[in-house]
Image: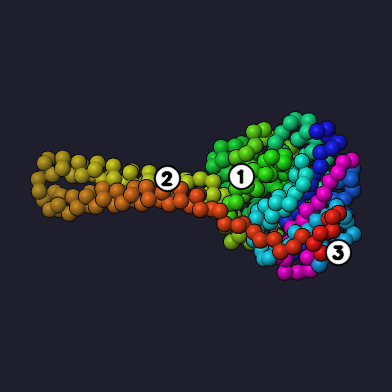
Amino acid sequence: MTKAESVISAVIPVFNEEDNLKALIGRLQPVMRSLGRPYEIVMIDDGSRDGSLAILKDLARENPELRVVELTRNYGQHAAIMAGFSIVRGDIVITLDADLQNPPEEIPRLVAEMENGGYDVVGTIRRRRRDSAFRLGASRLINIVARRITGVHMTDWGCMLRAYRRPVVERMRDCHEHATFIPALATAFAKRLTEIEVAHEERHGGKSNYPLRKLINLQFDLVASFSDFPMKMLMYGGILMSILGVCFGAFLAVARLAYGAHWAAQGVFTLFAVLFVFVGLQFFALGVIGEYIGRIYREVRRRPEYVIENIHGGRDRSGS
Ligand code: UDP
Ligand code: MG
């Protein structure tokens, strides 16, 4: 396929973004047009409670390139993007946020980097991030954790302005994972990854949809969906505790022989040593059981991750 034939898709999750949608499409359309090839825009209304859906439907009427996926309720940013992936037609798929924190003007650079370098995934690093100090600190921590868990060196996992090649999108789509973290999931299916620096802007309007609680949940998704690290800690902790118990017992035995019966408070300490060994073994056993449960958990994750209520707009005019 020549470059001119490859279709570019933009996938944008929308949750309570009524102040930003018109400005977004106003900036996105000229950029997409400037690529000089077929393109589409897929916006997913993730159960917005403001006027976002109505605005999106209007926009879909005016912009034949735009299709709007309406979800039944709020499923979260990553599930919404997955819903977008399920109908996307592009050979190169770009994800970005609806609040204009990711400038659409960067899209041509992402596409160029992907095509010229033959990459499967192009990530981004936010130059001069416009977020609060707290968010910056939290992100730094998350980036370290994500790097360890996936074993892939990406500098900035949080930035959703990313480009994926179609096969990567299809494989992610086939995963049917319930709680997921798309940039991390993509690394499981991409051979060639790179990162480029992009600009970052203040939120155009409205306020962030990520209060602390959601942020913590998202991080837990990242850790629990991509690693069994917490379970391994339980097992290793148990083994360590048992070993310490045995060492403590040996020490008591030696001290008892050297200093006599009254030194060890008539055997009370020995009880502690025995206790440590058994508590340690229990933790270990829990870890082993956890390992099996973890495997079951991985097997049963076949639940639908989202339910699409309707698809609006698009050239073929199916749906309303
Ligand atoms: N979003 C979503 N569902 C949610 C939360 C957020 O689709 O439950 C979308 C939101 O509309 C935006 C993107 O995800 O397009 C990023 O959200 P936000 O800007 O609130 O996150 P932040 O930039 O503060 O990390
Ligand atoms: Mg934002």
Q: Is residue 226 left or right of residue 101?
A: left
Task: Give the image quadrant in which the ligand numbered 1 is located.
Answer: bottom right
Task: Pick the quarter of the image with the N terminus.
Answer: top right
Question: Which quadrant of the view contains residue 5?
Answer: top right
| Visible residue check, residue 79 | yes
| Label placed on residue 77 | none
Q: Which residue is mark 2?
A: 232
Asked if the residue under mark 1 is in contact with the one under mark 3, i.e. CB atoms within 8 Å, the reply is no
User: Is residue 56 shown in magenta?
Assistant: no
Asked if the residue under mark 1 is in contact with the one under mark 2, i.e. CB atoms within 8 Å, the reply is no
Write down the region rendered in magenta. Answer: 36-53
Does dot 3 land on a helix, a strand or a loop? helix
Which of the pair 250/294 is nearer the observer? 294
Does dot 1 land on a helix, a strand or a loop? helix
| Label placed on residue 185 | 1
Q: Residues within 10 Å of mark 3 (few under 14, many from 20)?
A: few
| Label placed on residue 58 | 3
Residue 92 x, y percent position in the rendering: 76, 41
Residue 300 x, y percent position in the rendering: 51, 53
Of the residues shown, which amino acid type is indicated by label 1? Leu
Q: Nearer the viewer, mark 2 or mark 3?
A: 3
Of the residues shown, which amino acid type is indicated by label 3? Asp
User: Is residue 50 shown in magenta?
Assistant: yes
Residue 96 x, y percent position in the rendering: 75, 50
